[in-house]
Image (cartoon, rainbow, N blue to C red):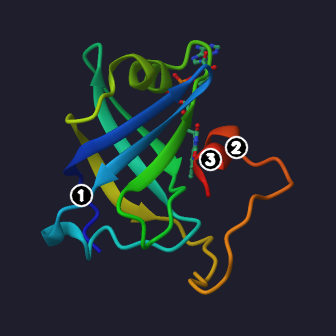
Amino acid sequence: MSLQFHALTVKSVARDADALVVGFGVPEPLREAFAFEPGQYLTLRADVNGEDLRRSYSICSAPDDAEMRVGIRLLPGGQFSGWAAQHLAAGQTLQVMPPQGRFTIAAEPAAQRHRSSSRPAAASRRCCR
Ligand SMILES: Cc1cc2nc3c(=O)[nH]c(=O)nc-3n(C[C@H](O)[C@H](O)[C@H](O)COP(=O)(O)OP(=O)(O)OC[C@H]3O[C@@H](n4cnc5c(N)ncnc54)[C@H](O)[C@@H]3O)c2cc1C
């Protein structure tokens, strides 16, 4: 796995009052590097007011979805989440590190997807099907 940042195109941004869900397109040459297991996260990188910020966000799409999505909850005074809420838009590119994280669960494509009744991060729950 190559742990370097790659420029991915933002395909979609869905916003509400306290969170946004960002969908990335993964081009064919990067498919292998960005293959993931449920439970892994992406590290996003952006220059925010001259500062090189890196933040991690759990992947909330399924491996076979067309877009790779993360949910970003807005934190009052949060540098990255505030920047993302104001500036991220479809068509932009963002520096993204390939998926990381060893706390994974085996994907079961045949299993029916369902919403959890517990309370995970609101943003993540919002973008799961
Ligand atoms: C493995 C992993 C997965 C994660 N997955 C998700 C996810 O799916 N969704 C998600 O939303 N987040 C997730 N996070 C958290 C995410 O990486 C960021 O930490 C989060 O978005 C906040 O970043 P920020 O730049 O917006 O806030 P920051 O600027 O880092 O600030 C965080 C908070 O601290 C306060 N603060 C900052 N500086 C000070 C100070 N000097 N004094 C007092 N208070 C201060 C801010 O006001 C804010 O409320 C994950 C983190 C990890 C490690």
Residue ID at (13%, 70%): 29
Left or right of 73, for residue 63: left
The answer to whether mark 2 and mark 3 are in CB contact below 8 A is yes
Quadrant position of residue 97: bottom left
Total labels: the figure holds 3
Q: Nearer the viewer, mark 3 or mark 1?
A: 3
Q: Residue at x 73, y 65 (%)?
A: 114
Report whether the residue tagged 2 is closer than 8 Å to ligand 1. yes
Q: Secondary structure at mark 2?
A: loop
Q: CA distance from mark 2 to mark 3?
A: 5 Å
- 78 or 35: nearer the viewer: 35
Residue 109, compared with residue 88, is above or below; it is below
| Residue type at numbered disc 2 | Ala
Residue 33's x, y, as percent?
27, 71
Label 3 near ligand 1 (CB < 8 Å): yes
- SS class, disc 1: loop
The N terminus is located in which quarter? bottom left
Q: Is residue 107 left or right of residue 43?
A: right
Give the amino acid at mark 3: Ser
- Disc 2 to disc 1, C-alpha distance: 27 Å
Q: Which mark is residue 58?
A: none
Which quarter of the figure is the C terminus placed in? Answer: bottom right
Of all residues shown, which one is farthest toward the right?
117
Residue at numbered disc 1: 4
Q: Position of residue 102 (x, y in %)?
A: 56, 72
Which residue, given by chain and number where applicable, does mark 2 sit on? 121
Question: Which sits in the foreground, 127 or 38?
Answer: 127
* Front position among marks 2 and 1: 2
Whole-Å distance between the Cαs marked 3 and 1? 24 Å
Label 3 vs 1, first from the N-terminus: 1
Q: Position of residue 51 (x, y in %)?
A: 30, 21
Residue to which mark 3 is pinned: 124
